[in-house]
Image: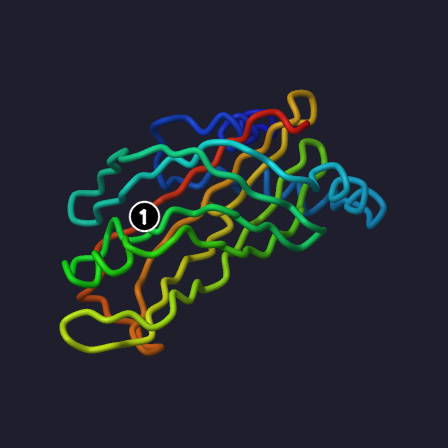
Amino acid sequence: MKKNHLLLLVVALMMTFSFTSCLNDDFDGKAKQNRPTQAELKAASKTIQGTYQGKLFTYTFNSTNNTIQKKDSVITSWEITDDTTLVVKRFPSKLLANNVTNADLKQAIEALPDQEVKCAVSIFNVNPILFYIAPYRLDLGKLTYGGKTHDVSVGFIFNPNNTYGGYDNAKKITGFRLIESVVLIDGTTDKSLYRGFEIFDFRSEPKK
């Protein structure tokens, strides 16, 4: 896939998409042959740093029938603080609970205030600017459900074929994707409490 097609996918964030790799072998091979210099990476990092306002679109992937269902869109904000960190400032807790199957736990998560989701970023291409993004586990604290109190957190996956972002230098907009995959209770994954994958696509307004 050509670079401009990849950037279009990342930044325009089309309403329908598949899990088919957009970073195909041809593009990946060329990227490895033309790795950015440290000076180019530093300049690209400086370009994308700043605070963004935009929309968060949510989708659910159903592994049973391999379908993707669009759900909600909300206004939110995020900040790229340096060459390795992106922080989503207002992540609605209600969206984090979309795929939680236990009704009491779902209600407890939905009642929480908006969360901050911290992510590691790594620029791998500078023309256009493209970056990998890997969210850290999000600790939600002690929640009571089913008559007991537990430490609850949610986890995200990192897959370079699907969790990445880009920046359109001409329009000064950025887009990226996160994928929530699991809920952890007292540090242990409980697959019975979570179904499928929840996909979060972000698209910004022009940076001021």
- Residue 88: give x, y in percent of width and height: 52, 48
Residue 157 relative to residue 194: left or right: right
Q: Nearer the viewer, residue 22 or 193?
A: 193
Query: Where 46 falls versus 171 (above or below)?
Result: below
- Residue 71: give x, y in percent of width and height: 27, 35
- Amino acid at the residue labelled 1: Glu
Image quadrant where one finds the C terminus: top right
For disc 1, the marked residue is 198
Estimate how packed mark 1 is, as few (under 14), some (14 to 19) or many (20 or more) residues with alpha carbons within 10 Å. many
Count of picture labels? 1
Q: Residue at x 16, y 43 (%)?
A: 65
Query: Where 1 falls versus 49 (above or below)?
Result: above
Q: Which residue is outermost to the top?
A: 170
Q: Nearer the viewer, residue 16 or 95?
A: 95
Q: How is the image coloured?
A: rainbow
Query: Where 208 falls versus 96 (above or below)?
Result: above
Secondary structure of the residue carrying tag 1 is: strand
